[in-house]
Structures are given as structure tokens and as C-alpha cells.
Amino acid sequence: MATIRDVARRAGFSVATVSAVINNKSGVSERAQQEVLRAIRELDYRPNRVARALSRSSSSTVGVLVPSVDNPFFPQVVKSVEDVFFENRFVTLIGNTEGKIERALYYIKSMLSGWAEGLIITLTWEMIQPEVLDGLRRARVPIVGLAGARIIPEYDAVIPDDPQGAFDAVKYLLGLGHRNIGFIGVQESQSTTLRLEGYQHALEEAGLEIQKDLIMLGRNYEQANGYILAKALLRRSPRPTALFCFNDVMAMGAVSALHEEHIRIPEEMSVLGFDDTAGSYCYPQLTSVALPKTEMGFLAASLLLERVRGKDTSPEVITVKPRLVVRDSTGPMLGS
């Protein structure tokens, strides 16, 4: 691999001149600049990012940690994050923790060893474990939380209003005449806890009793768990006439279960998701609580950029508002 000294010899100028051209510094003649650029092309020279970071006290690199790249919510948010950093000429590194502590620690260490100037993390279970928090704090770089619900007091965060979104969803189903509304969520999930609060609040406001048998929590956020939990709810008596699911992925699993049981949607059972990542791509199209994913990514990236550039104020938590998007998977209860 060519070095900066090889470029200097080929161009016939000093290493200092080559460095000035690479870093876009003033004071370099047009001739010197052209000769250096020609030598760089001929030698296929690629500047060492770590060396440049040391000399400039900046690596123009940030990291993003998400719990799942399979869940379409996270790629959609990360795209918005990456767009902001690209516009500001930063490289964005992505790490998929899969909700595991050891993977989170590996990516934190790797990204910071690669001179990442800051991290955006999803505020999920693995990120608040003591060993992970210790690694983040020792790194002494800006951190911004994005989505999830486990706030870390010393860091900025952008989070959705989960209780309000769930409340709006269940109130809508109640307005359609549904009274037995099943809830599908995830164990040990703070976001599930908050959405369950909204679900219960809506039922209590309507004067209805909370039926614990209609609340089903699975092991993860995947489609298979939505399928399994929907099957279990179908065995309940009385059977629910509507299902409110933690996310669109689990809702799609529930839809598959209902199709398999020849239950018509929405005539015999309504299905409602959360996050609006896949609602328009399934049959019937899914009613869902939409989160402003582009806005969330933009806000988190902007907060991190401000911190990287020296902003020194108290941590800020921004709560974004969800909105209900009504499609074909919900309708009035038969006979209502």
C-alpha cells in the first residue's frame, strides 16, 4: 500500500505539501496541487484515517447501535441518521447488537477504536446493563439515545410518546365497538410497559375492566412471536374481537395466524400495529400507529453533531408524537 512519502517522491514535493493538499489547506500552488493529485491517483493512495484523526483531532466518524437490522423500523431510522451525517461529511458505522450485551460491548470497543467521535444508541435492555454503561462512560464521547424507552440521564435522547400512541390506538378500537381487545407485546421491554399503560388507560377511561387473559407477552419482537401469541389469544374465552400489537412485524405474524384459522380481517377480527413500517405491504393493509422515523433520525443526528462540535449544555430529551394511520385491517365489530 502506498504511503504519503511515496506520493511525495512521485510528485516531487515535500510530505508537508502532500499533507496540505490532502487536508485542503491554503497556501499550495496550483501546480503543486495538480502534481500531488496526479501522484495520488497513479499510486491509488488512500490516506490513513487514524493518522488524519490524530493530526486534525477529528475522525469525521460516528457509530450507530441498533438491536435488530431485521426489524424494518431501525433501518428506516438509521437511513435518516446517515443522511444527516453524509451531508456533513461524516462516515456512519452501524452495529447490530441483537439485544446481546457481548455484541454491544464488541461494537462499542470497535467503533471507538476506529476513532468514532460519538455514538447513537437505541435505548434498549442491553444498553443499560452496568458493563455496557461503564464502557460508554469510559469512552468520554457524546452519546445520544434514539428510540427505545430506557432513558440514561446523562445523555440526550429522542423517544416516541409510547403511552399516547397506544392510548389513541385502543380508543380508536373502542370507538369501533370493540370491548374485548387483545394486547400482544414483549417480556422485559420498557416500550411494551409504556404501550401497555396506554392500552390500560384507554380501557379504564371507557369504564372497562382490564382482562389480564387478553394480555400476551412473548420473548422477542419478531413475526413468529406475533403468530404464536395470536394463536394463544384465539383460545381465550371470550375471544378478542381486536388485537393491538407491539409493532407491525408482530402484527403481520398475527395476521398470518388469523388467515390460517380462516378468520376474516377486519370483519371478524381487527388488527392494529405500531410504528407503521410494514402496514402498506401486507394484506389487508395494516392500520398502525405511525412514528415519525425520518424526524427521529434527523433529531438524533443533529443532537450528536452539536455535541461533537462542542455544545456543552444539560442533556435534552425530545419526545416525538405518534399518529394513527387507518387502513384496511380494522373495522366495526360485527353487530355493533
Image: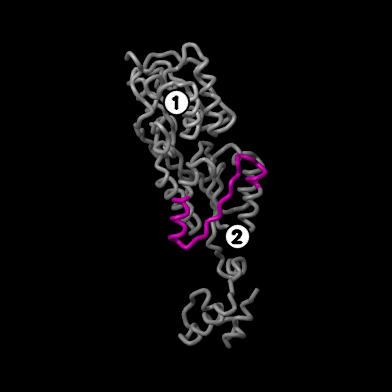
| Image quarter hosting the C terminus | top left
| Residue toward you, 324 or 226 | 226
Q: Which residues are magenta?
A: 79-105
List x then y, in percent, for residue 78: 48, 49
Q: Tell me the tag on residue 244.
A: 1
How many other residues sit within 10 Å of disc 2, few (<14), some (14-19) or many (≥20)? Answer: many
Q: Determine which quarter of the picture holds residue 325.
A: top left
Give the total number of marks visible in the rendering.
2
Residue shown at 36% from the left, 33% from the top: 324
Q: Is residue 70 above or below residue 272?
A: below
Query: Residue drawn 54% across and 78% down?
Result: 41
The quarter of the picture where the N terminus appears is bottom right
Q: Secondary structure at mark 1?
A: strand
Would you identify the image quadrant in which residue 270 lies? top left
Direction top: furthest residue: 237
Residue 115: numbered disc: 2
Residue 176 placement: quadrant: top left
